[in-house]
Image: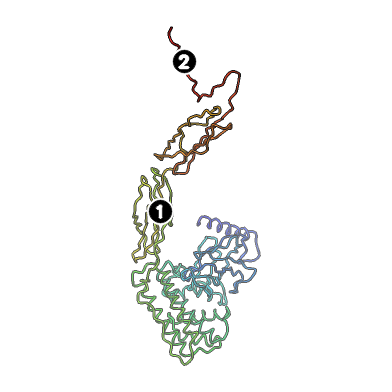
Amino acid sequence: MYKKGFKYLSLSLFASILLFGCGSGESGSSSSSNLTHSISGIIVDGYIKDAIVCLDKNLNGLCEKTEPKTTSKEDGTFIFLKVKVEANKFYPVISKGGIDTATGETFYGELKNIITSEDITLGKQLSVSPITDLIATTFLESPKKDSSALETTKENISLALNLTKEEIDKDPMQDKKVFAKAQEIQQVKTLIEKSSQKANGSKLTSKQKNSITLALVEQINENSTLDISKVLTNIETNLKISIPTNEKSFIQDQAVELKKHLESINSDNTSTEKLNEIQKSLETKLEKANEIITNAKETDILEKVKLSNNLDKVKDTQAPILSSTNKTFTTTLGSPLNLEIVTAKDNKDKNVKVVQSGNVDFNAVGTYNITYTASDKAGNKSSITHTYVVKELSDTQAPILSSTNKTFTTTLGSPLNLEIVTAKDNKDKNVQVVQSGNIDFNAVGTYNITYTASDKAGNKSSITHTYVVKKIEYKGGIVIPKNIELPKPPIMPNL
């Protein structure tokens, strides 16, 4: 990334040298390099997806139709492709709306930051957060929008917030100290906007919201802390509104409560991995605080929304996610299957063990269950079951009969003995042979006797014996039926 940025920067400088060498007549002017670059970064309150992100090329603090626009992705990242960048210029990045992925709720705010043409050519990743919004808003309102104004603004705000200039540009979700400051600013600003909008009687414009941000910056720079009382007084003057006394007191008390608990994050062993859930918890409390302001009457006594004393101990109610689902597998006797390897991922615990229970006997017909269970440290469990059905080998072979198709011929009155047909099967021991049909040996004709055998699997085999009964043919002489016994000749006496 740095090599690529250095290449572009070198080309830009080389172009500037050529222009100077050719005697451009505009000494000290910011000539366009006409080079295109990508500008990328991340939108953070929690990570904000689906935000409309624009590049404010004319530095008026607005997103105009002709200016480049993009949308933040699921992880809050965004990118502008092939943007023409002029040397020695400042480019505000403005993010509007979107969905906070930590809470799943709509983010109604506007966040900004400033990136320089030099940082763009170097491929710097821009973080846009509540802290950078203070800097960008102040810079855009300054009479001279130059390097000196930007550096002065960064120095003043970093000093007031007890952050370094490097920390100001960090992703708040990756640094507890920066996270605490960013959340304090954004949550207090949201409460003030809610009360101001109620007093105004209509939705605040971008200019009015910027006025609230500037009032916060002015107060931070003056006292190196957030004196909400003075901020509210300045806002009332700037917006020409009157905020009820009980709402002012409520916002001040809530700001103190918020600051106290956010500061505790830096004094304990809270992991940055938990910041998403801490922010979700804070947003839930903020929603309640906003409701109190919305529904408050001037005579009401408003009690602050108490925050948890253990922000780092957000209850984990999410069970581990297993890499597989409930499934059924089928096989036949003696054909074992490899059991699936199931793993688990958890939102909190890095290593979650998956316990397997149950067994399968692939040499015995039956249905077997293998259960996989994963439990995290908070006691959340998830499980799935793999069912294995072991069946007998598929029987597709029909019984074999002891005879075949045959034809027998006889004559009237000459019956034949019917053949005894048996059957053997590859699976069943005793297979019955069913005989159907009949024969009349005393009537000329053709008769069929069918033998059929079926096994338990439904396989069938059959044969047919055909019997042809014909007339007796006379060819002269005496025809003696076979079933008539002739008398024996008499025995002659011996002479």
Q: How many marks?
A: 2
Foreground pick, 139 / 322: 322
Q: Secondary structure at mark 1?
A: strand
Above or below, comparing residue 394 to residue 444 in the picture? below
Q: How is the image coloured?
A: rainbow
Above or below, comparing residue 327 to residue 224 in the picture? above
Quarter-wise, where is residue 263 in the image?
A: bottom left
Q: Residue at x 46, y 75 (%)?
A: 157
Location of mark 1 (residue): 387
Foreground pick, 143 / 349: 349
The answer to whether residue 397 is visible is no
Location of mark 2 (residue): 490
How far across and down, in percent of the image, does residue 14 sit? 58, 57
Residue at the extreme bottom of the image, as rendered: 299
Foreground pick, 20 / 249: 249
How far across and down, in percent of the image, does residue 397 sit? 46, 38
Q: What amino acid is labelled 1 in the image?
A: Thr
Foreground pick, 364 / 295: 364
Query: Which one is earlier in the sequence, the residue at label 1 or at label 2?
Result: 1
Mark 1, mark 2: which one is toward the viewer? 2
Q: Few, some or many C-alpha atoms within 10 Å of disc 2 (few <14, some 14-19, many ≥20)?
A: few
Q: Residue at x 55, y 62 (%)?
A: 79
Measure the C-alpha gap from mark 1 to mark 2: 91 Å
466 left or right of 158 in image:
right
387 left or right of 467 in image:
left
Above or below, comparing residue 337 to residue 190 in the picture? above
How far across and down, in percent of the image, does residue 201 sit? 57, 86
